[in-house]
Amino acid sequence: MKRIWLAVVVLLLAGCGVQPSWVTAGGEAPTGVAPGVTLYFVDAHEQLRPQLRPTGHLGAISEAAALLLTGPGNSDLHTEIASQAVTQVVVTTTPGVIQLLVPLTIHDMSPLGIDQIVCTALGVHVQGGGARNMKVQVRFTQPTPESDKQRTCPLIR
Amino acid sequence: MSRRLWPRGLRARLLVAFVLVTVLGAVAAAWSSAGSASTALVTSTQQRLTETIVGQIGAITPQLTYPPDQGALDLLRAAVGTDTLVTYQNLRSVDGADLGLVTDALRTAVHTQNQLVTQRITVNGRPWLLVGTPITITAPDGTRTPSGIEVYTVRDLTDVEQQIDGLAGSAVSTAALAVPLAVLLALLAAGSVLRPVRELRDTARRLAAGDLDARTPPQGADELAELTVTLNEMAESVQTSMVAMQRMQADARRFAADVSHELRTPLSTLTAVVEVLATTADGMEADARESAQMAIIETHRLVRLVEDLMEVSRLDAGTASLRVEEVDVVGVVRDGLRARGWLDLVELVAPEEILLRLDRRRLDVIVANLVGNALRHGEPPVRLDISASREQVWIEVTDSGPGLPEHVLPHVFDRFYKADSARTRTPGSGLGLAIALENARLHGGDLTAGNSSGGGARFVLRLPRDLEDV
Amino acid sequence: MVAILLIEDDPLVRRGLQLALSRHGHEVRTADTGEGGLREFHSATPDLVVLDLMLPGIDGFEVCRRIRAASEVPVIMLTARGDDFDVVGGLAAGADDYVIKPAQPTVLDARIRAVLRRSTSTPDGVRTHRDLHIDTTALTVSLHGKPVQLTPTELRLLLTLSRAPGRVFSRQQLLEEVWEHDYLGDSRLVDNCVQRLRAKIEANPATPEYVQTVRGFGYRFGPV
């Protein structure tokens, strides 16, 4: 009889309050730190190549895009985006799609140049903890059907 | 629980059982619902807290210099909130408050698991949520490596606990509400069970008290109804056999009474004529005279026997009436002895006078039987003591014979009991002591047989003084 | 020679008692029914009647009542022992005494003689108490100058009580003196006889002038 009462009391107590627990997994760890930002340029064989620009931090997509527009600097890589004085890129992130408004026209770059922008933006997104299946929409200053295309980076699948 | 605490009454037991079952049921239901609710509450709270922390960290990490310096760590700590510690190799954020709470198990998990971990602890009665997480570096291709930065933070769960306590409290009050209802139901149930039980008990009592007509109408078709039917059947058979037995007894008594009555008429004739015979016996021849004398003696014996039988019949039938008047017991006893010529044979020890309300003739019958018995079966001297207290009067008749053997004592008042089978021809009818006993009882007294310390048989008649009501 | 009328239905008992009482020197006539007994009573005028209560036709109680209505002749009834109904009814009907059956002739004879002795005179003259005159020689009683008819038992009771006015007689004493019974005499005989006596001499029997009851003890003669 004593044991039954003990069990009842234990059960009653178990129903009350917040119970301590063991260490339990609580999901993915946050991410986003990086020694620098990765920009994508083109090598001699017309292949996209990542280039780590040691900025000390990952930064935002707009920063990375602005750095990309300034060119590869002293390197054996080149860019296929026409050089511009204005490098400000407006970034709008909606669910599933990152929109980049570049201060250029479709004529200022080759398709590979578009991939450079897409890969750089997607890389920053992924490094900041974002999903890899994000689409990227590159909008140009002059109206063109290319502005509505949702693109993916061939290097980041 | 000791047996003493368990109530004896059926009603109380039912009540306790009912209340226990109800309370246990209510508590179990309330506990399980409160339990699942509190689990859900804790889980969702925990998830919300970790998501907030992950969001807070994720919002600032892209701007954080890596490898971090002291400033970066402090910045991160400020973003996550107070009670937070950020470490990187040997660096640790300043201003990280009370982190003694963080357990070694949590630290180890953060070091090894490369993911966010949580642990709930209770310290000094306050519940806390510990969250620990490493910050990872994600390569562009998605591979993650530990950055070496670790964030530990502590969140107070007191609010959650209070909500859970509220849930438990409402569960307890719900159970408490059920208790009076359970008591009411238990009383109703106990009543419906106990009423037939009580009726059965009353019937059984009435049966035991001699009311053989007592029955309980069975209700329903349960075990109690079966018991009732069985009890009724038992009462029926007892009644049947009792009635049969009473009829047989009554028949036997009536037979005895009828026989005695029928014998009386021829005995009247015999009694009348044997005296004529006696007065002429002197002129007869010896054998004829002896025959006449035997006829006289046997006729008188027969008369006494028939009278005693009729007296016993009346006593048995309860028609013997008590004619009570105030008499002097000593006087009646002395007169009785004198009338029978026993004054010289009996030593009478008595006070001057004892006034008592009783039936004079019946007292004489008792004393005559006791003294006659002592004179016939015992040896002289026979002693008769009369004594009195405020409530009782005792009349003791003691003889100086060998006394009554042990095996005879229980039977001395039996009808026609002869102690000595060889001595069957005694002048007594064999009913004398039985009649004496019945007469004593008719007076509310009694008559006992035993042996005196001197060895002789001793009979004690006890009569109550307050016979006013009889 | 006392003339006795024996009324008894059983022929053998009747004959047996007749034989035995004759032996004791009585002249015994018999009757076997109540009607026959009454007829015999009126034609033979016996000194005393011995009456069995259980009779075919009109029963002993009725016979006793009719005899008592016509005469003061003593009546002794034969009853069964312990049959109080018989005793009470018989005494109420006016019987003077009773003998329990089976009656021993010697006992019956003693009772007969006792009843008859009650009318024996004592020569001490006339006792006068207020309006009541008792002539103990002539054995007559008169109230307000008118003669009162008493049975021998009633007369002997009155004589006994009035012999010592104011003295209390216990029932037992009266039984022994008047009825000549032993210590086991039936006190109802006394009570019944007193009632009948009062009915004859008292103006109001409920508040008697001459025969007073002494509660729990007996009776005495005289004013309250």
Image (cartoon, rainbow, N blue to C red):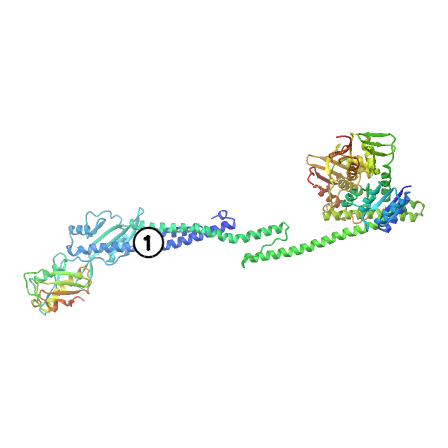
**Residue under numbered circle 1:** B38
Relative horizontal placement of residue A23, taking residue B388 as reference (left or right): left
| Position of the C terminus of chain B by quadrant | top right
Examine the image and state in which quarter residue A82 appears. bottom left
Q: Measuring from the top left, give residue B90's x and y in whole percent.
A: 19, 51
Residue C186 vertical position relative to residue B205 in the rendered view, above or below: above
Q: Nearer the viewer, residue A4 or B314?
A: B314
* Chain letter of disc 1 in the image: B
Relative horizontal placement of residue B199, taking residue B70 as reference (left or right): right
Can residue B298 be seen here? The reply is no
Q: Nearer the viewer, residue B405 or C34?
A: C34
Q: Measuring from the top left, give residue B309's x and y in whole percent.
A: 77, 48
Q: Measuring from the top left, give residue B295's x and y in whole percent.
A: 87, 48
Can residue C173 be seen here? The reply is yes
What crowding class fits label 1: few (fewer than 14 Cα within 10 Å), some (14-19), or many (20 or more)?
A: many
User: What's the residue type where badge 1 is placed?
Assistant: Ser
